[in-house]
Amino acid sequence: MCVAVLVAATFSFGCKARQELKPHALSPSQSIEINPEALKLGVTDTLSFGNMRSGEVIKKRINLKNSTSEPIVILRHVNTCGCTKLSYERKPIEVGADAAIDFEFDSKGQTGWQMKLIELYLAGSDQKIKIYIEAEVE
């Protein structure tokens, strides 16, 4: 009996038409404050993309707030996976200002729990900003 139910369930899922997955609209943002201590020690944060289906693309935003006494410049970034992308304006973040960084995670070919790392390198700091992208892909 159990085997028949399992076979029927598997068959019914396999018969559904494949729904095309489209990118989500940009989700609300979270903030990271860059202050003198953060420049000295570095910053680590996690951006959760939640539960996703394989092939889904989700975009999220982080705002960097400059709480130092000098403008901040993002020199470069490093992705640990081609499935992540980010974009930001290539200009200094003035004192007291915010700058948006948009992150995109493409779950195509991914399954299970995912943890990806993106590192931002700032001028005048030996430390980096580490942002982990986390998702559960079904």
Image (cartoon, rainbow, N blue to C red):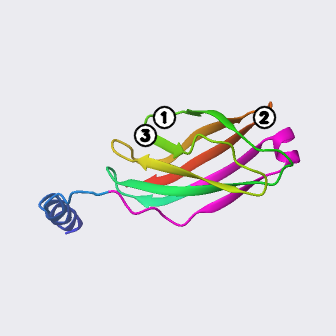
- The part of the image, by quadrant, that contains residue 20 is bottom left
Give the residue at mark 1: 81
Q: Are marks 3 and 1 in contact (CB under 8 Å)?
A: yes
The three-letter amino acid code for the residue at tag 2 is Gln
Above or below 75: residue 48: below
Residue that carries the numbered disc 2 in the rendered image = 127
The quadrant of the image that shows the C terminus is bottom left
At 48% from the left and 34% from the top, the residue drawn is 81
Disc 3 marks a residue whose amino acid type is Cys
> Mark 3 = which residue?
83
Q: Quadrant of residue 26?
A: bottom left
Between circles 1 and 2, the one closer to the viewer is 2
Find residue 125 and report its horizontal and vertical position in percent. Answer: 80, 34
Query: Left or right: 73 with respect to 113?
Result: right
Number of other residues with Cα within 10 Å of mark 3, as a class: few under 14, some 14 to 19, many 20 or more: some
Q: Secondary structure at mark 2?
A: loop
Front label number (2 vs 3): 2
Pointer 2 or 3: first along the chain: 3
Query: Residue 115 placed where, x, y %?
Result: 55, 45
- Image: 74 above or below 51: above
Percent position of residue 5, x then y:
20, 68
Q: What residue range appears in magenta? A: 23-47
104 left or right of 12 in image: right
- Whether residue 27 is in magenta: the answer is yes
Q: Mark 1 and 2 residues: CB-CB less than 8 Å, in contact?
A: no
Left or right: residue 118 versus residue 81 is right
